[in-house]
Amino acid sequence: MNEKKLVFDIETFKNPNLHDDYMEWKLGDLVNKTLKDPIKIKADMEKKSGKFALDARTGQIIHIGCLFVNVGEILLPENTPVLETELAGDPVKKVEFRLNDYDSEKAMLLAFLPAFFKAIDEGTQLISFGGKRFDIPYIRERAILNYIANPGIVRLSQLTYQYENQLHCDLENFVSGGGLAEWNYLLTGEGSPQNDGANIGTYYLEGDYDVIAMKCEQDLVRTYKFFKGAESWL
């Protein structure tokens, strides 16, 4: 059994650098074509623009959280903070990448991707909740849009195979439904069953970067505890 794990999660927000003409075209493409009332059309556009954070073409990554479990050296830029701790009895190194600490999303990705791929290339198993459906494709597409070449041996497409479990164990694929918050609530009785990811954008606009980091770390811890509890069934 592979003891080395990398639990990861990303937080996203609407890309503020989108051109107005693209925004107008995108909203026009997404709006409900059956609507005739201008007020309802405007309301529908506002609703659709609120989803821009979830699409790599219209969003950007604002935070990446990682828990390196039983992993030795991590390939990181100099002076990157690494917090060593313990989780579920295992030694953990916590590393986070905050967009507000870098000049651009590209700079943040260039700091994160070498560590990510080094771990994978050395046989570290990825652990996520929804990573195959959302996080990995989003990272890949944002890297492409930032003109970043793949620095690893393993291609990200290999990490999204639904029935592949050794490279990447995505817990979302092993349950019939429900989000991470709901499963955590059912298993531990802690927190709320409702996912509050929709508030990330508000925290980002208000400069509450520590809150975003706390929310991301909370999800990482939930994911790893869920994995440890369900490991014999995976």
Image (spheres, grey):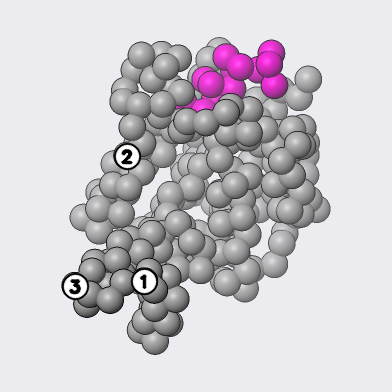
Per the image, label 3 sits on a secondary structure element best described as helix
The quarter of the picture where residue 185 lies is: top left
The quarter of the picture where residue 127 lies is: top right
- The x and y percentages for residue 178 are 47, 30
Q: Residue at x 66, y 53 (%)?
A: 114
Please name the residue that numbered disc 2 is placed on.
196
Left or right? Give the position of 233 relative to 225.
right
Q: Is residue 231 magenta?
A: yes
The answer to whether the residue labelled 2 contacts the one labelled 1, judged by CB atoms less than 8 Å apart, is no
The answer to whether the residue labelled 1 contacts the one labelled 3, judged by CB atoms less than 8 Å apart, is no
Please name the residue that numbered disc 3 is placed on.
39
Mark 2 crowd level (few <14, some 14–19, many ≥20, 10 Å Cα): few
Mark 3–mark 2 Cα distance, whole angstroms, equals 28 Å
| Among numbered discs 3 and 2, the one appearing first in the sequence | 3
Q: Residue at x 26, y 50 (%)?
A: 203
**Amino acid identity at mark 1:** Thr
Mark 2–mark 1 Cα distance, whole angstroms, equals 31 Å
**Amino acid identity at mark 2:** Asp
Mark 3 crowd level (few <14, some 14–19, many ≥20, 10 Å Cα): few
**Mark 3 against mark 2, which lies toward the viewer?**
3
Q: Nearer the viewer, residue 61 or 152?
A: 61
Dominant SS in magenta: helix
- The x and y percentages for residue 157 are 73, 53
**Mark 1 against mark 3, which lies toward the viewer?**
1
Considering every residue shown, the one lying at the far bottom of the view is 21
Residue 9 appears in the rendering? yes
Please name the residue that numbered disc 1 is placed on.
34
Q: Is residue 212 magenta?
A: no
Q: Start and end of the magenta stretch? A: 221-234
**Amino acid identity at mark 3:** Ile
Location of the N terminus (image quadrant): top right
